Amino acid sequence: MSELLDMEGRSGRETLARTLRGLREKAGISLGKLADDTAYDKSYLSRLESGQRFSKLGVMEELDLYYGCGDLLVSRWKAAKREVFKDEFKGFMDLEETARVMWKYTPGIPGLLQSEGFAQEVLSGPQATPEPEGWVEEQVAARLGRQQLLKQEPRPYVRVIIDEYAFRRPTACAEAWVEQLLHIESAARWPNIVIQVLPFKAGLHHYMSDSLTLLWQEDGSAVAYVEGNTSGVLIKDNAGVLNRRLSYDRLRDLALSPSDSLAFMRDVIEEHRS
């Protein structure tokens, strides 16, 4: 196994691909045999081993179990996942993964609470320039994998304020939209997550087009992250963080209570089911 551990200097994706191929060759099985044993398409497995595709986290979990290699593939998948996101987002992700308290405001459905079908719809929308083949699948897989931090132990305490606008613009696919509504309504009932809706009647505010995240670590240190459509800014100085904390408090004061927000979401679900 030592040759599988020595991948210094390679990209996360290349390391994952070489590890997949190395494990299969070490086991002495063909791609066809692996496809038969795992029920994954042979061409799909081949693209994973060549680094042409980026899988969902569940695929790596299954292959770790198949090869009996602990969490080797999962850990390398997590490292490769970082390469899918923009550079300015990676520093925030490091802090997000270890945060004990997380407060968010978003004008749309946040990535951490998106269902697979909704993420697929959002990321498949019109782009200013064509994206490379497989880009959407990679982004969806990385986004869904990032959601695992909501379930890791110890679980972070998460509060999310979502603008009513997010619930009033459905996807083109009605089935994907109802699935998303049910997913977020379910998340609102998790013990570590509070979701509040900021109604239209709250009026204008400073974060109409930006999202705001506040993170607190175990030691009490805090950062803020403000993200627009094309870039994000990580704020670490105390004065800057405090300023964003006060902005968040104002938004929370204007939002529906958690119980009223849950009732609002259920009403929207019924509207789209009828």
Image: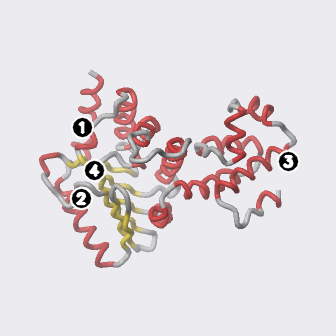
Q: Quadrant of the N terminus?
A: bottom right
Q: Nearer the viewer, residue 184 or 114?
A: 114
Q: Do callouts 4 and 2 mark residues in contact (Cβ within 8 Å)?
A: yes
> Which badge, 1 or 4, comes first in the chain's sequence?
4
Label 2 secondary element = loop
Q: Do callouts 3 and 1 mark residues in contact (Cβ within 8 Å)?
A: no
Which mark is drawn over residue 261?
none
Give the x, y percent position of residue 147. Answer: 48, 49
Which mark is drawn over residue 26?
3
Distance from label 3 to label 1 (Cα)? 53 Å
The residue at which mark 4 appears reads as 107
The residue at which mark 2 appears reads as 207
Residue type (three-letter) at the residue carrying disc 4: Pro
Residue 102, image quadrant: bottom left
Residue type (three-letter) at the residue carrying disc 2: Tyr
> Which badge, 3 or 1, comes first in the chain's sequence?
3
Residue type (three-letter) at the residue carrying disc 3: Lys
Q: Nearer the viewer, residue 60 or 153?
A: 60
Residue type (three-letter) at the residue carrying disc 1: Arg
Give the x, y percent position of residue 184. Answer: 36, 40
Q: Do callouts 3 and 4 mark residues in contact (Cβ within 8 Å)?
A: no
- The structure residue drawn at horizontal position 49% and vertical position 46%, both measured from the top left corner, is 131
